[in-house]
Image (cartoon, rainbow, N blue to C red):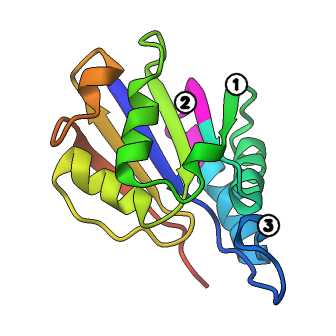
Amino acid sequence: MKHIYLLRHGKAVNPAGRLDHERELAPRGQRDSSYIGEWMAARDLLPDLVLVSSAARTQETFERWRAGAGWDGASETDDELYLASSYEICDRIAQLDNAVDRVLVIGHNPGLEMTVRELTDTAIVMKTATLACLTSELEAWSHAVGRGTCALVETHTPERS
């Protein structure tokens, strides 16, 4: 069984004059990213591999997530995941080594929401720091990322105060 975890980056700041790629997390985004790591660790949902967009806000989300989860596994930064479409996200996942059973992709909307829709035939809203947990009975990543090949097991968004 393959597990795909899709995590939208935490809430980011939008300072004037800063390029989108360089936006950093707001304090809420920092807290939420750590929380999602803790939440996943408590439920034994930790990945074998993390794929992270090269944007500053996704990199910071990953570092906060990693600390919250107490996780020290393999990760890859991928420039192609920055504002990637569902097709690009699925294509990247399809290339994974089949020895990997669980992957976490930290990226952006609308690509993540469209990936959930593509893989599960379910439309969801992914606010910042929302996690979508998908599974597929197919054992090869190249087969597990086709239209409707996954089940949406759950989503989780940190409570906003």
Secondary structure found at label 2 = loop
Mark nearer the viewer, 3 or 1: 3
| Quadrant of the frame with the C terminus | bottom right
* Res 136 quadrant in image: top left
Residue 26 drawn in magenta: no
Q: Position of residue 3 (x, y in %)?
A: 38, 31
Residue type at mark 1?
A: Gly
Name the residue carrying label 1.
73
Earlier residue among tags 2 and 3: 3
| Quadrant of the frame with the N terminus | top left
Q: Position of residue 56 (x, y in %)?
A: 77, 59
Horizontally, residue 76 falls left or right of residue 111, namely: right
Residue at left 49%, top 62%? 130
Name the residue carrying label 3.
22
Earlier residue among tags 3 and 1: 3
* Res 135 quadrant in image: top left
Q: Which mark is residue 51?
A: none
Q: Position of residue 52 (x, y in %)?
A: 64, 44
Q: Which residues are magenta?
A: 38-50
**Category of crowding for the residue at label 2, using alpha-carbon neighbours closer than 10 angstroms: few (below 14), some (14–19), many (at least 20):** many
Q: Are marks 2 and 1 in contact (CB under 8 Å)?
A: yes
Distance from disc 2 to disc 3, alpha carbons, whole Å, reads: 26 Å
Secondary structure found at label 1 = loop
Distance from disc 3 to disc 1, alpha carbons, whole Å, reads: 25 Å
Residue at left 68%, top 30%? 75
Residue 42 drawn in magenta: yes
Earlier residue among tags 2 and 1: 2
Residue at left 23%, top 50%? 118
